Amino acid sequence: MMIEAGTFCLAAAIHFGRLMSGYEHRKAAIAESVIAFVLLVGLAFTWIRATSTRTVGLVAQSFAILATLVGIFTIAIGVGPRTAPDIAYHVGIVIVLVCGLIVAARAT
């Protein structure tokens, strides 16, 4: 979840215009920041309550997938940013999040 959250932080920084210009999109940056925050809180809870790691992993990553699917929907209808890097990131992070969900689901 740390890597997932890190990629959302990077995406937010790009959309806030902090790392490069030309890709600014405030609503996308806010959404990515919220997703990163939820993943980081989930990660913290896995350390605080190790007995709840599976549940926390499932909840945090499910939220991230649902929010990312909303992002894909906004791209599809033309509301969100529609650049090639945005599309590639969304496809890639969904794959990573699904893999994370599978790992969390198999955890005991």
Image: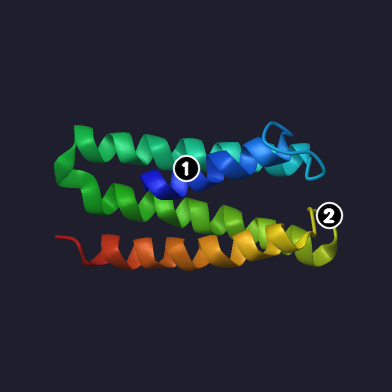
Q: Is residue 28 left or right of residue 102?
A: right
Q: Which mark is residue 79?
A: 2
Q: Nearer the viewer, residue 53 or 26?
A: 26
Q: Are marks 2 and 1 in contact (CB under 8 Å)?
A: no
**Residue at (32%, 51%) from the top-left corner?**
57
Residue 39 spot, x, y in % from top left: 42, 43
Taking the image as shown, residue 13 lies to the left or right of residue 9, namely right
Give the crowd class for mark 1: few <14, some 14-19, many >=20 residues within 10 Å: some
At x 51%, y 47%, the residue is: 7
Which of 51 and 75 lies nearest the eye of the viewer?
75
Give the vertical position of 10 relative to 86 (above or below): above
Element class at badge 1: helix
Give the side of residue 48 with respect to residue 61, left or right: left
Q: Which mark is residue 6?
A: 1
Q: Position of residue 70 (x, y in %)?
A: 66, 57
> For the residues marked 2 and 1, what is the alpha-carbon distance in whole angstroms?
24 Å
At a point 38% along the width and 67% down the height, the residue shown is: 99
| Circle 2: element type | loop
Does residue 12 appear left or right of residue 15 in this picture?
Answer: left
Amino acid carrying label 1: it is: Gly
Task: Give amino acid for label 2.
Answer: Val
Q: Quadrant of residue 34?
A: top right
Position of residue 65 relative to residue 49, above or below, is below
Any mark on residue 83, and which?
A: none
Q: Residues within 10 Å of mark 2 (few under 14, many from 20)?
A: few
Of labels 2 and 1, the one closer to you:
1
